[in-house]
Image (cartoon, grey):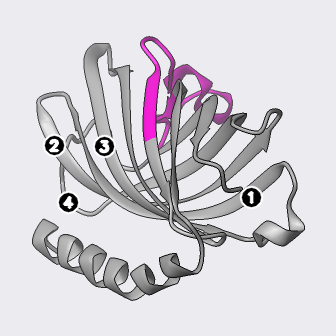
Amino acid sequence: MTFKNYLLLTLCLSAWVAPLAAQETPYFKASIGLNIIDNSNQSSRGFWGIEDVAFESPLALGVDYQANDQWSFGVNTSFNTLKELGERSKFFGMNADANYYIVKAEGRNFIDFYGIMGAGFYTAFDNTGITVNPGLGFNYWFLETVGVNLTAKANFEVNSGAPEVQNFYQYSFGVIFRMGENF
């Protein structure tokens, strides 16, 4: 599947979900935190590939649009440094995600638990790869507009990007800010 096909699929899904946004006043959320990339895949020689976990320059940034109490759509970027086979490379990744909140807003007071489906790309080792990214996320709101965010995603490569990277797991932990009055 080409990038154009993924873009078309994203637009079609957005058009299908957009009418749901009319049920509630939408708002934005922004997050900043740390990310860890587990690139252990086939090259791991140690216990769970812990030597392949990247945490050298682990910045994660994100913006989400909470369309209603069940759906949000976001763009996330991550920066890191990978070390594979003795070589170092800067890592940059960007993903567009659709998030489905498993528990409706009426049933949650300060905790959000959601499933993630997204697509994106990364650059590392002078190559670019395109990925599909399923995952899970969790927000704990300790104030009305400030909380803690934790996400875990599996990034499956759909084209041959950097052979040093291929499929990888990505975890992020950070602070999230709600920029609106709705919950």
The part of the chain drawn in magenta is: 36-62
- Single out the mark in the foreground, 1 or 2: 1
**Pointers 2 and 4 in contact (C-beta within 8 Å):** no
At label 3, the amino acid type is Met
Give the SS element for disc 1: strand
Counting residues from the start of the chain, the first of labels 2 and 3 encountered is 3
Q: CA distance from mark 1 to mark 4?
A: 30 Å
The residue to which callout 4 is attached is 159
Q: Amino acid at mark 1?
A: Phe
Q: What residue does disc 3 label?
A: 94
Q: Is residue 101 above or below residue 42?
A: below
Q: Identify the residue under disc 1.
A: 113
Helix, strand, or loop for circle 4?
Answer: loop
Among numbered discs 3 and 4, the one appearing first in the sequence: 3
**Disc number at residue 128?**
2
Q: How packed is label 4: few (under 14 Cα within 10 Å), some, or many (20 or more)? A: some
Query: Where residue 59 sits in the image (x, y, percent)?
Result: 44, 21
**3 and 4 marks in contact (CB < 8 Å):** no
First reached walking from the N terminus: tag 1 or tag 2: 1
Q: Residue at x 77, y 72 (%)?
A: 104
Separation of residues labelled 3 and 1 (CA atoms): 22 Å
Q: Earlier in the sequence, mark 2 or mark 4?
A: 2
**Residue flagged by tag 2: what amino acid is it?**
Thr
